[in-house]
Image (cartoon, helix red, strand yellow):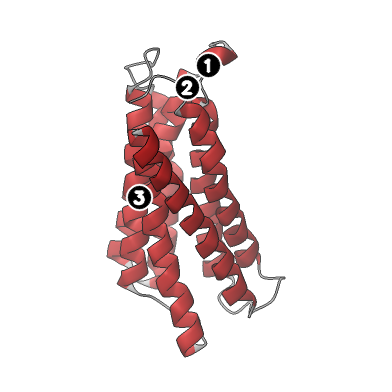
Amino acid sequence: MIEALENGFQLFATGFCALLSLHRARTLEKREWALLSMFAGAFFFGDLYWLLYIIVYEKTPFYSFIPDLSWVTSYLFLLILLIHVRRNDPLRNPRYPRALWLVLVPTVGMCLLFMQSGDYISNLVYAFFMSGLLWHAMSGLLDMRKRPERDTCGRRNLYLLSLLFCVDEYLLWTASWLFPTAGDTLLNPYYWFDAALSVIFLLYLPVLRKVAGNELH
């Protein structure tokens, strides 16, 4: 019951984010709103399959390529959004610091950890997109250093929120991997991290609204 309710809340959060972003994309004709809509919309369909499976079969699906395909697609749209916002920053640093290669340490490490369950291809794909998301979120934050607050135009919050999204996803996966039999109880950390993910989707709306208020197009 708890899992169904929590997934229902996330379905609402992603659906609301997708629909409102789509409305703003059509009325404001801003590309970043369209990308956010596709990011949340793709995640919504993965959640929809997950929730329907729980309702119909009364158990959590062990593995399915259908929601994985939706969630990986959502990562792609978020990655394109970050790249789009950063490339339209006139004060960005065109050169990447070598320290950014350190993002491969957690992504490759977690990939090897989760590969112990046998899902080699899916873990490699997730590691690839997570590396890209962390890379561009961190590079965007580095662009914000030593700049007046009025020059950030909300970009810092977008990069921070995307970084938080990646961290929460890893915490969510780790909780699911470490506590597979924790049960349908609030003591299961999986539900708390998944609920936090729902809040992150809703936070993208005010954050991107500030970003879209500048001269991005």
The label on residue 38 is: 3
Chain-order first, disc 3 or disc 1: 3
Q: Residue at x 33, y 32 (%)?
A: 83
Q: Position of residue 123 (x, y in %)?
A: 35, 60
Q: Residue at x 50, y 55 (%)?
A: 16
Q: Quadrant of residue 28?
A: top left
Q: Using a 10 Å C-alpha cutoff, classify the residue at mark 3 as few (fewer than 14 neighbours), some (14 to 19) or many (20 or more).
A: many
Callout 2 amino acid: Leu
Whether residue 108 appears in this view of the structure is no
Q: Determine whether the residue tagged by mark 3 lies in a helix, strand or loop.
A: helix
Q: Position of residue 35 (x, y in %)?
A: 35, 42
30 vs 112: above or below = above
Q: Determine whether the residue tagged by mark 1 lies in a helix, strand or loop.
A: loop
Kindly indicate whether the residue at mark 2 contacts the one at mark 1 (C-beta within 8 angstroms): yes
Q: Residue at x 52, y 41 (%)?
A: 205
Q: Using a 10 Å C-alpha cutoff, classify the residue at mark 1 as few (fewer than 14 neighbours), some (14 to 19) or many (20 or more).
A: few
Location of mark 1 (residue): 145
Q: Determine whether the residue tagged by mark 2 lies in a helix, strand or loop.
A: helix
Compute the Cα span from label 3 to label 1: 30 Å
Whether residue 216 appears in this view of the structure is yes
Which of discs 2 and 3 lies nearer the camera? The answer is 3
Location of mark 2 (residue): 142
216 vs 28: above or below = above
Compute the Cα span from label 2 to label 3: 26 Å
Q: Position of residue 75 (x, y in %)?
A: 36, 49
Q: Position of residue 74 (x, y in %)?
A: 36, 52
Compute the Cα span from label 1 to label 2: 6 Å
